[in-house]
Amino acid sequence: MRALFNLPAPAKINWFLHITGRRPDGYHTLQTVFQFIDWNDAIDLIRRDDGVIRRIGADDLPQDDLCVRAARLLQEFTGCRSGVDIHLRKSIPQQAGLGGGSSDAATVLIGLNRLWRLDLSRADLMSLALQLGADVPIFIFGRNAWAEGVGEKLQAILLPTPWFAVVHPGRGLSTGAVFSTLDLTTPRAEAKIAGFAEWLGKFCESGGQGQGADRGMNVPDELGFSPAKGASPLWGRNDLQPGAVALEPEVARAMQAVRAELDRRPSGLRFEVRMTGSGSAVFALVDASVVQGLQDEGGLPAGVPASWPAGWRGRLCKGLREHPLQHWIQA
């Protein structure tokens, strides 16, 4: 096998993100639920016989990016003498909280495991992935999951596959800068997976529309917005959202724009808009009945309404049940 083309590297959203503390090594402990969505980068891997690992293609990404680091790490771990040309075609916005860079690195590990005929197990690849970043292991794990620790303690969870309106306000956010805004002086109670599962059951019973969700679980709105008419709260919160908004007001502006766009439609906004990960992208669950209308108007899924600021990007994304390359790895 000489090459693998158009390997998908999907984005993810965080249904919630609770920061529970900070370890002595500086990493923050957290609780979250990851779900893959069908917004993908694409990667070509072309095997080389000289051991050289390099990026090809014209883009503005560094030559020593996370994809190259992933390939080198795998090469060093296995002693493989093959090399690779990596062609990455970006679609997922950078510094958006959508996991694009982490997903790219994971797809390189998965693809090279096959291209170089290494036959490493999922556990081996996840161990390597964690050396590249806390978000990389979920893309090797390959299933939607409840995550704890720094994001590496994963428990598979069956999620519905709703539509999400995902909007990036044209500006990225440094994960380190966002985490630096946290105040961890007050102890934070840890959530229980059973609580999320109970809420999710009600969500599914209501057809994903929110009528069955417990409106008594309302979370104070960190941004000071008035709750959208008829919108239910999502479970939990994103602890990084207030700090992200303080650093980049466009995040709040994007949330307001998504709310307004959906709230003007019948059954359009069932749940509040939330930031994903460390931002700056925001998402909202979209009722299937309004998906066609949004598509017909020429904005989402491949862009945003013409009246929105230049540079913003948006898509209607479908939640996935698993990573597209989930079955490429042995147990």
Image (cartoon, rainbow, N blue to C red):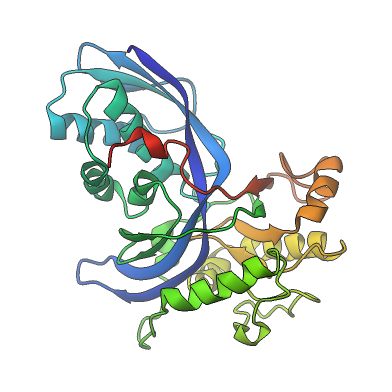
Q: Can you see residue 306?
A: no
> Which image quadrant: the N terminus?
top left
- 155, 63: nearer the viewer: 155
Horizontal and vertical percent for residue 279? 53, 59
- 4, 240: nearer the viewer: 4
View extreme (front): residue: 205
Horizontal and vertical percent for residue 194? 45, 76
Residue at x 54%, y 69% (from the top left corner):
241
Residue at x 38%, y 63% (from the top left corner):
147
Task: In the rendered view, tell whether residue 159 sits above or below residue 53.
Answer: below
| 196 on left or right of 125 | right
Task: In the rendered view, tell whether residue 145 sits above or below residue 116.
Answer: below
Q: How many marks?
A: 0
Q: Quadrant of residue 274?
A: bottom right
Horizontal and vertical percent for residue 103? 42, 42
| 43 on left or right of 298 | left
Residue at x 80%, y 61% (from the top left corner):
262
- 252, 296: nearer the viewer: 296
Horizontal and vertical percent for residue 202? 62, 73
